[in-house]
Image: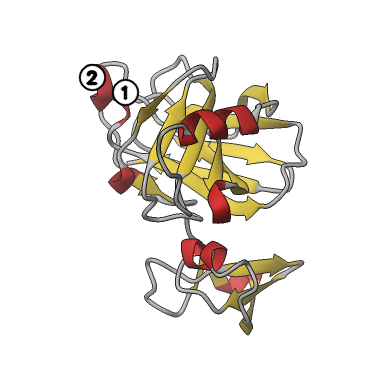
Amino acid sequence: MFSPRDMDLPRGWPGRIDGERVVQLAAQTLQAFFTGGGGAREHAEYRLDEVELRPPVLNPPTIRFFGHEGTDFVFLNTASVTGPEDAVAAPRGVHYGLAIAAVVGADEGIGGFTLANAWVAPSLVGAKQRDFALSLGPTLVTELEAHDARVSVNGEFRASAPLAVDWERLRSHAAANTTLRPGDLLVVGLGRGESTLAPGDVVELDADGIGNLRNTIA
């Protein structure tokens, strides 16, 4: 999803990145693109430096968050999604949460993958620890070619984690006795920061092919 910098489009349009340009696709949302079979017509083209990238899914129907062990999930707040370069209004004592997300496409299959920062506030109780923000982006890839993801804070490397996830097992578990819809998110935590972040700190997640998910603590 993207918005031209000279237009007030908080939700943005679906687009396809081709080198240094973005091609607008004829769909209102990523969910509509998947539902339509992924064959939307192409519209206008923009230079990559003329646009702002938005979260691939701004209003997901559901978000299921799996811990690193990947045995079960909890539901996260679908209204908490933020995108690349967004400031994150975080509770005191927040930690980053390096994660990878799969977006459900058509026919309950996996439509693509993106980076996720599953922020966590250990000072809060229970589900409120993750209720305030989930950052996604910057791009969605249909095939996950990167072998690992990395995180840095204020330009200093902190950690990396392999992206070896059994997505079919998690998708099957999530789909059991229910229906997955286009735009549903399956988020897998890869590791949590151990130091407390402060307002002004910049957290960057990076993976080859997906790009750099950068957010500042507000």
Mark 2 neighbour class, 10 Å CA radius: few under 14, some 14 to 19, many 20 or more: some
At 31% from the left edge and 17% from the top edge, which residue is drawn?
122
Residue 118 image-quadrant placement: top left
At 56% from the left edge and 53% from the top edge, which residue is drawn?
107
Is 48 situated above or below 111? below
Q: Is residue 91 visible in the rendered structure shown here?
A: yes
At mark 1, the secondary structure is loop
Residue sitting farthest toward the bottom: 44
Residue sitting farthest toward the front: 177
Residue 77 position, x and y percent, is 30, 39
Residue 120 position, x and y percent, is 36, 25
Label 2–label 1 contact, CB within 8 A: yes
Is 2 situated above or below 86? below
Tell me the residue that label 2 is attached to.
124
Front one among 158 and 43: 43
Residue 179 position, x and y percent, is 43, 44
Residue 110 position, x and y percent, is 60, 46
At 26% from the left edge and 24% from the top edge, which residue is drawn?
127
Q: Which mark is residue 174?
A: none
**Is the C terminus in the top left, top right, bottom left or bottom right quadrant?**
top left
The amino acid at mark 2 is: Leu
At mark 2, the secondary structure is loop
Tell me the residue that label 1 is attached to.
121
